[in-house]
Amino acid sequence: MQYHVLGRTGLKVSELCLGTMTFGRETPEADAYAILDAFAEAGGNFIDTADVYARGESERILGAWLANNDRDRFVIATKVRYPMGTGPNETGLSRKHIMTGVERSLERLNTDYIDLYQIHGWDPLTSPAEMMRSLNDLVRQGVVHHIGASNVKGAQLQKAVDLARAHGWEPFVCLQPQYNLLCRATEYELLDVCRDEGLGVIPWSPLRGGWLSGKFRRGMEMPPSDSRIAAAEEHGWGERWSNYNNEFTWQVLDELFAVAEDCDKTPAQVAINWLLQNDVVTAPIIGARTLEQLRTNLGAAGWSLSQEHMARLNAASAPMVSYPYDADAQWQRERD
């Protein structure tokens, strides 16, 4: 496992980050421990969770595992924003919710500090200055070492960066966006801000909820009943079958399977490696419901796609965009 510096922090994190959204939900506690053990044994030190994952169970399971391991060896990231109770202030990014949220996360994680504390989306009801001031105070108190953002727009991210610079507050050091072969709109504005401002990028859903895992091929009429995509249709999640059963998806998957065969790799490994080739990406977040899935995904590291294979994947996955992004899209095609 190689290590990359997270933004401009000097903090070294493994090139793959372990996502724990399934812990306490699809993945039982004992299986989660086995996954964490295997990730650490492979050299992984970067682990991402959130207070909302399994209503705190993911953080608690990770905290129980950390109690029997060297806490300082690992870079632990968690998030705050989503509702964690029924009260009117148990959601959002108000100072009250942030302060309560970090206290509860520290308790569940069984730790005195959080390496990376991220907002889990924007809160239109809280002024950006109030949000950034509150996060800055957490760093000054020592309970949080760095702050970051997830699921924000380019303008929102730049606003937060500019506020921190103007007031001398702790800045965001990284962005956690959705980014994969089926979601490349992230390249317009968001990645530009990260590159210009020196933020690390830790993409979530590199396999788009399973669509890029190798389980789906052109000609299928419905998802496997035991797949996340089948569950997504029931729960209305973004990766549901009705959103992705279209020609663009099958075009991307056709090329993904072809490149995987050329490289003697799995489609999942190719999809993750495609992200690793982007110089602005610090560490894709790989989730795993099972130990077998983790081991497959770890095989995405340690090798590189050829320029030819990158060009083929880029061409197949190029999104249809309108003005003013079409000029950027044309420039990207010319560069590839």
Image (tube, rainbow, N blue to C red):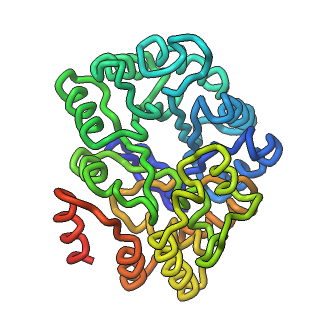
Q: Quadrant of the C terminus?
A: bottom left
Question: Left or right: 60 with respect to 155?
Answer: right
Q: Quadrant of the N terminus?
A: bottom right
**Residue at the image position 70 percent from the left and 48 percent from the top:** 36
Q: Is residue 280 visible?
A: yes
Q: Give how far across and how far down residue 98 sits, in percent.
A: 47, 18
Question: Left or right: 266 with respect to 36?
Answer: left
- Image: 335 above or below 205: below
- Image: 260 above or below 105: below
Quarter of image, res 154: top left
Q: Give how far across and how far down residue 30 sits, in percent.
A: 83, 44
Q: Give how far across and how far down residue 266 sits, in percent.
A: 62, 76
The answer to which of 48 and 74 lies nearer the viewer is 48
Quarter of image, res 217: bottom right
Q: Give how far across and how far down residue 40 sits, in percent.
A: 66, 51
The answer to which of 197 and 83 lies nearer the viewer is 83
The answer to which of 179 and 173 lies nearer the viewer is 179
